[in-house]
Amino acid sequence: MALEQHLHRGEVSQARHNLLKELKRFSKATGVRVATRGGERLELGLVPTCAMRDCPAWRGEVVGFKNGLPDCPEAEGRSRICFPLWARGEVVAVGTLFHARPPKPPTGPAAPVLWLARLATPLLFIPLPEEPPELEVYALGGFRVCYRGQELSPKSFGRTGAFRLLKFLLANKERALYADELCETFFPHLPPDKARQELYTLVYHLRKTLPGIVEREGAYYRLHLPEKRFLDFERFEELMRKADLEEGLSAFKTLRQALELYKGPLFGDDPYGEWAEAERAYLQERALSGLLRLGDLAEALGYKEVAKEAYARALRLEPFLEEARARLLALRG
């Protein structure tokens, strides 16, 4: 098959053009258009203009105009059929067939076109995988670090103190930290000169394992995170802020996504790290308020079991949270 030969040679554009030719031939259409999620448009033959923004085909429906199919709200003029192109369980593009004269039967072209598109779409329009983050940090409930796809252990840093210094910098990622403050935190019993020398050694080992992760500005140190990164606590806070601006089902979905990230207190494997206590308490308070709101939204939406689990989980985090206890008891009757 010509399509397979083009793909084998890496000629994706030519393979897509061949797909349009086959769609046009199978359907006897005057013109064919395929629009991708990324805004790319491929056209063959005579095709009228169309915004293709609110077409129900993006939601997985087959619609049309002047052919017995449910009407597409954007359609006007000549007969057309709009259909979704699926790959990996999502609509990755929308195809449209235009006919100068309505085909007979009107919906006849739909079946063979959908069959052909089903075979070709996963090969031609599958979403490109995003470039993985350079640095991944999982600090809610424990602590795990991955750099360029490889998990790092405390031994990877050469000195255990360098691993702990990374935690401290992450907990204060928005601050420039005075060198003497770091010395007092990590080496409170050493003379100042000796403490500074030990700090320089930890910074050296940290930079050796994670190049560029620490910047020095005079007497201050600052964490320098790569642009492509994933920090679970940072993403948690982003989603919580997003949920704060949403209502109803949208807020419910965003909260569930955020709270899946909250697997326990910040740096839960280091419960005696007092240096993280302020940030740890803040994030737990956010999680508790999020669970209460999630339960409230779940009740309003009729998801009783989800509400029960939200309140029960809040009680596991804070056993004396009376609001959660009362709501859970009311749901259990």
Image: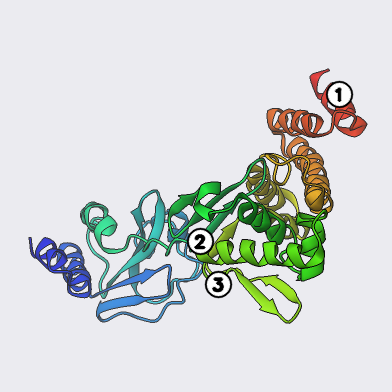
Judge by depth and name the residue closer to the eye, 260 or 299.
Answer: 260
The answer to whether residue 153 shows anywhere in this view is no
Judge by depth and name the residue closer to the eye, 286 or 156.
Answer: 156
Which is nearer the N-term, disc 1 or disc 3? Answer: 3
Residue 11's tag is none
Q: Secondary structure at mark 2?
A: helix
Q: Residue at x 58, y 68 (%)?
A: 213
Q: The disc labelled 1 sits on which kind of residue?
A: Ala
x, y percent for residue 204: 58, 66
Q: Which residue is mark 1?
A: 330
Residue 96 sits in which quadrant?
bottom left
Residue 209's tag is 2
Q: Residue at x 39, y 48 (%)?
A: 89
Residue 212's tag is 3
Residue situated furthest top in the rendering? 333
Mark 1 Cα shell of 10 Å, populated few (<14), some (14-19), many (≥20): few
Left or right of 207, for residue 58? left
Q: Secondary structure at mark 1?
A: helix
Residue 229 sits in which quadrant?
bottom right
Mark 2 Cα shell of 10 Å, populated few (<14), some (14-19), many (≥20): some
Q: CA distance from mark 2 to mark 3?
A: 9 Å
Quick check: marks 1 and 2 in contact, CB under 8 Å? no
Q: CA distance from mark 1 to mark 2?
A: 53 Å
